[in-house]
Every structure is written in C-alpha cells, then in structure tokens.
Image (cartoon, rainbow, N blue to C red):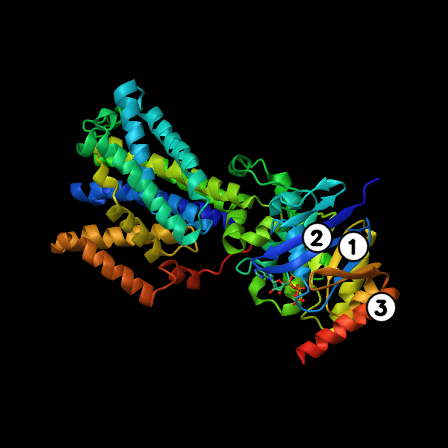
Amino acid sequence: MNPFLEIDRLTMRFGGLTAVDGLSFTVEHGAIHGLIGPNGAGKTTTFNAISGFYRPSGGEVRLRGEVISGLSMHEVARRGVIRTFQHSTLFAEMTVLENALMGTHMAFRPNVFAAIVGWDREDRRGAYARAVEALEFFGLEGLRGERAGDLAHGHQRALGMAIAYAAHPDVVLLDEPFTGMNPEETTRMMELMRKLRDSGVTILIVEHDMHAIMGLCDRITCMSFGKLLAEGGPAEIRSHPDVIEAYLGGARHVS
Amino acid sequence: MPRTVLLVILWAAVAAVLVALPHALSFSQQEILVFMTINLLVVASYRLLTLTGEWSLGHVVIVGVGAYASALYTKELGIPVPVSMLLGACTSALIAMGLSYPLFRMKGFYFLIGSFAAGEIIRLLWKRFREPFGGPKGIKGIDPMPDFSIGIWDFDFFEPVSYYYFAGAVVALCLWLLWRIERSPVGLTFHAVHWQDKLAQSAGVNVRAYRTLAFVVASGFAGLAGALGAHYIGTINPNGFDVETMVFVLTWTIVGGTATFYGPLMGCIALTVLNEIVLREMGFEQMRPLIYGAVLILSILFLPKGLESLVQKLVKPRRVEP
Ligand SMILES: Nc1ncnc2c1ncn2[C@@H]1O[C@H](COP(=O)(O)OP(=O)(O)OP(=O)(O)O)[C@@H](O)[C@H]1O
Ligand SMILES: [Mg+2]
C-alpha cells in the first residue's frame, strides 16, 4: 500500500536561493503531523509546493501514490488537499457566512444555468447547511453576518480553517493557525484539531507555538535551511540535540 | 407576507411609470430613451465582467461584434431579425471565448491593455474588409424589426415608442438574468475570485474558468445590446464602437459605482439625463467629452464610491440567506 502523503526529495529554488532542499518525509493517514523549524527554514515554501501554489524545482509530492506536484492549486484542492495561509487570507469584503460558503465550492459546484432557472435550490441549501456546520464547528456561528475583514485576528484564523473544513478535505495544511490567539483560544482550537483528526482528516501543521505542537502532534518533522533535520514523536524531537541547536542558533541569530 | 405584497406593488408602479414614460417625452427624447435603454444593458453586462476584478477596454467592440454579426446574418443569410439578434449575442460570446485564451494569460493592467489591443484588431478588420463588413463606411440599410401586432396593439418598430417597449422588455429580461447570476453561488464565486484569487483556488475554484465565464456571459449580453441598437439605427460603422464610446461606458460605470448591481445603471441614467436633456437643451452638446471628463474627475474626487453609495446609505445591505 502506498503511503498517504509523500514528500519526496522536494526542492524549491528562487533564483540563487534554495528555500527547500531535497526534503523528504511522509504523512500517515489520520495523523496530526507537525512541520517545525526556525524562521525562514522553508516551511511555508514546502506548503506552497505541496498545494500547487509553486511548481517544485525538483522532486515530487504524491497523494495515495498519485503525483500531485506540478498540478495547479485548484486541481490539488480537488484531490482533497486544502491549505490555509500564514497571513490571514480571507475574502475580506465578504461576510463570514459567504466566506464559509466558498469552502463548499467543490461539493456543490455552482452552475449558471441551474442558478438562473432555479434548479440549484437543493445545492444551495446543502451548501448553506455545510457552511453553517463549519462555522459552528469553529464557534463562529454568531458572527456569520460580520464582514470577514472586521473580525478579530483569532477569529480570522478560525474562519480560514472553517473555509478549509467546509471543503471536506482529506488533508489540511495549516500554516501557523494559532498566531493571534490567546492561550484559551489555542487550547480550544487544539481540541478542535483533535476532533477533526478523529473524523478522519489528516492534518499537516506548521506552528511556532511549541507547547501546542508538542501537545498536538503524533509525529513531527523538523527542518532547517530547507533540509530535513530530524523526525520523530514529540518526545524525541523535544530532546533531539540538532533541533535544540537549530532553535538556539536561530534564537542567537535573532537576538 | 406584507413584504412581498409591497415589493409587487413597487415593481408594478415602476413598470407603469416605464410604460407611461415615453408619452411624456418629445420625439427626440424618445429616441434617446431607446438608446439609454440599450446602454443600460451595456453597462450591466460590463459590471458582470468587473465582478471578477478585470476591467476591459474592449467591451464596446464586443457590443459591435453583436451588432455586425446580427446585421450580417439578416443581410447575407436572410435570417429573421429576432433570431439574428440572438445569434449576434452568441457570436459575441464565441468571439469572447476565443479572445479569453490570450487575454486571460494577463491580469489587471496588462489585461486592460490587452483587451484594448484585441478590440482595435477587430475594428481594424471591420475597416479593412469591405466584404462583408463594408469597410470604414460600415453597413447601411440594416433590416428593421418587422412590424407586428398583439391584438389591438400594432407595433411599428420605426417608431421609437414601439422600439422602446420592445428593447425595454428585452433589456428588462436580461437585467433580471444578470441579477440572478450575480445573486447566485456563481456570482459569489466571481466576487471571491476578485477579492482573493489564491484563497479561491485553494478552495478548488478554477479561477481561469470563472474569469472566462464572466467574460463570455458579459460579452453575450453586450452583443445582444449591440444587435438591439443596430436594427434600430439601421446603420453601423467601426467608429461607432471606438475607444471614445468605451470611455463613456467607463464613465457611466465609475460615476455610478461598481459595488452594487444598480450602481452602473444609475450612472448611465444620470449622465444620459444630464447630457442629452440638460446639456442639449442648453446647447452645450459639442462639449460632451469635456463635460464627461469633468464629471468623471468630480465624481472620483467627491463621490469616490459612486452614486450608489448615496443609496447604500439609505438602504442597509441584505445578508445572504438561502
Ligand atoms: N517567492 C519567493 N521568492 C524568493 N524567495 C522566497 C520566496 N518565498 C520564500 N522565499 C525565501 O525562502 C526562505 C524560506 O521561506 P519560508 O517562507 O518558506 O520560511 P518559513 O519556514 O515559512 O518561515 P516563517 O517561520 O518565518 O514563516 C526564506 O529565506 C525566504 O526569504
Ligand atoms: Mg512561513
């Protein structure tokens, strides 16, 4: 049987800079898999290459054995891989509910003729129900009429995830989902992540909040300067000398 | 439901006013009313295109494609006028489909310039080929709508009033269709593509396909508007669809505002009334481009969100519910 999501010698170059350098790891089905590393390690770039935002300079990404790297973003999405963005990227001018409705695009593909004639009542109702369910899951139900751009930062992060959730993903790629959330919100969100995983969704998560990562992940991949540094369970990673060095080195570099 | 009753009464009143309107106007004003009705369809279809965030400078040429196509279908192939109008609309949509392949490799400013170039190429073809487009002089003696009668009412489509009723009915139907599209999940997706194409893509939206869809549908309606105009005026030429005309369409759209469906319609009506009725009465007709320029600048300075923003202050926006 093929591994579920396989990143195989993935390389991403920007001019002279190699942001991701021959990175390989696999994500098990139904796992919460963490991807960590100091600032600029290439985590977001890895996400961008998996989700089809970039075409990798080398290597492959395979989902259930099928090569998905090089496909465009909506084609990757249609294969069940949905990503969120590091900086709150929302349809800021649209309402919270409309944002969530966009997440239902693939399940209830809109059609001009059906829309004019009115044959899409069922679909609209289905999409609405799914969108409301997604908002309820993330506790945003009460904000459905708000303009997305007006939400508090934590709510914006949650809405980004609600859009992904509404799309019925097989895999979600979450890029720093907990930034801008207070500790209680983070704890609640971690609970939701576990619930999501238990419902069969595989999660690949990038996050700097080590407490959250260690508490949440089944497996963690640590990268530095585009390369794989270490991989293992939370306990292993926490005590891994290379990881400690990379983070301390990073910290020294920053300060 | 009192709300529905109220709406029905309101719309009935609007319809009654629109039916009675031409009888309160002079003959030349009636003609202007016909053109304005057709122009409403031009700006409304233009708005559909702008929903996806792309502004084209070729829209008026697409209107012309519908006009030329419909005129030629009647002239060369003997197709009845109402049918040829629909075929003209389809032709515009097809041409737009063809243009979308090169044009939608571009975005924003490049799309704007690309659409202008594409439009100029089409106009050049009209000028260059005497057969069948008639060269710079264009096509004359285009078949009018055939007379017809419903019961006691006779419609002679040389009469502006009759043509106004005909065009008005067609345009009203088209506006309703455009409105249905905009308020549908398809319309929501157009908005989404405009505001955040990356996020839309990550939700599985084929952004290119949606841009093309908006362009093709908008062009179809634009082509129908062109055909409606061609069979009323009876003559068309390449200069009727030049960039100056495009600037008028842009001015109507910007002065009206593009955030709402009715914004561009308001812009078109307000400027037509200003231009044709006020200015012409006062004898300033020659200064039309100058005055349009001034109105455009003033509205950008003092009413940047368009005439529609005045209405929006009065009516709170409604939320999407199923
Ligand atoms: N489009 C791009 N063009 C050029 N260089 C880029 C581009 N995107 C990322 N980089 C560079 O690639 C490297 C990795 O960036 P990336 O955003 O993937 O890091 P990251 O691990 O997500 O960091 P952070 O934790 O700060 O989000 C950085 O040096 C960055 O400057
Ligand atoms: Mg990043």
Locate residue B58, reporting x and y percent: 34, 43
Label 2 sits on what residue type? Tyr
Instruction: Kindly check if marks 3 and 2 are in contact, taking CB atoms under 8 A apart as contact.
Output: no
Mark positioned earlier in the residue sequence (2 or 1): 2
Disc 1: which residue: A196
Residue B164 seen by the camera: no
Disc 2: which residue: A165
Locate residue A125, reporting x and y percent: 64, 44
Instruction: Kindly check if marks 3 and 1 are in contact, taking CB atoms under 8 A apart as contact.
Output: no
Locate residue B291, reporting x and y percent: 20, 58
Disc 3: which residue: A240
- What mark, if any, has residue B97 been given in the picture? none
Placement of the C terminus of chain A among the 4 image quadrants: bottom right
- Residue mark closest to the camera, 3 vs 2: 3
Label 3 sits on what residue type? His
Mark positioned earlier in the residue sequence (3 or 1): 1
Residue at (77% x, 42% y) in the render:
A64
CB at mark 2 closer than 8 A to ligand 2? Answer: no
Few, some or many residues within 10 Å of mark 2 (<14, 14–19, 20+): many
Which quadrant of the figure shows ligand 1? bottom right
Give residue A213's quadrant in the image.
bottom right
Chain label for disc 2: A
For numbered disc 1, what is the local secondary structure?
helix
Label 1 sits on what residue type? Leu
Residue at (40% x, 42% y) in the render:
B175
- Identify whether A139 is placed above or below A245: above
Chain label for disc 1: A
Q: Which of B3 and B31 is in front in this view?
A: B31
Residue at (17% x, 33% y) in the render:
B137
Q: How many labels does the image show?
A: 3
